[in-house]
Image (tube, rainbow, N blue to C red):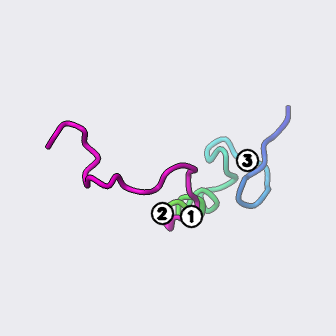
Amino acid sequence: MKTSKCPQCGKDTVQDFRPFCCKRCADLDLGNWFNESYQLPGDSEMPEDGDGCDDGR
């Protein structure tokens, strides 16, 4: 059976923390999302009309 590697440190993953090896690596990854170290591709600008609604308000 092939084991996966933790994306943070490269150790083998543990089922309870998949895809990570431990809570620490999972928390480090979550912190990177909170600090905006990771970004999803796409438009990051807000619409010019303000709220982005198209219902005429």
In the displayed image of the protein, which residue is found farthest to the bottom?
Answer: 35
Q: Measure the alpha-carbon separation of dots 3 and 1.
A: 19 Å
Secondary structure under tag 1 reads helix
**Sequence-first tag of 3 and 1:** 3
Q: Which mark is residue 32?
A: 1
The residue nearer to you, when weighing 41 against 23, is 41
**Sequence-first tag of 2 and 3:** 3
Q: Position of residue 47 (x, y in %)?
A: 34, 52
Main secondary structure found in the magenta portion: loop
Q: Position of residue 42 (x, y in %)?
A: 54, 49
- Identify the amino acid type marked 1: Asn
The residue nearer to you, when weighing 57 against 4, is 57
Residue 21 magenta-highlighted: no
Pointer 3: what residue?
Answer: 13
Which residue shows up at 58% across the image and 50% down it?
41
- Identify the amino acid type marked 3: Thr
The residue nearer to you, when weighing 38 against 21, is 38
Of tags 2 and 3, the one toward the viewer is 2
Q: Measure the alpha-carbon separation of dots 2 and 3.
A: 23 Å
Q: Which residues are magenta?
A: 34-57
- Disc 3 crowd rating (10 Å Cα; few below 14, some 14-19, many 20+) is some
The quarter in which the C terminus is drawn is top left
The image shows a total of numbered marks equal to 3
Q: Position of residue 37 (x, y in %)?
A: 57, 65
Contact (CB < 8 A) between labels 2 and 1? yes
- Disc 2 crowd rating (10 Å Cα; few below 14, some 14-19, many 20+) is few
Secondary structure under tag 2 reads helix
Residue 46 magenta-highlighted: yes
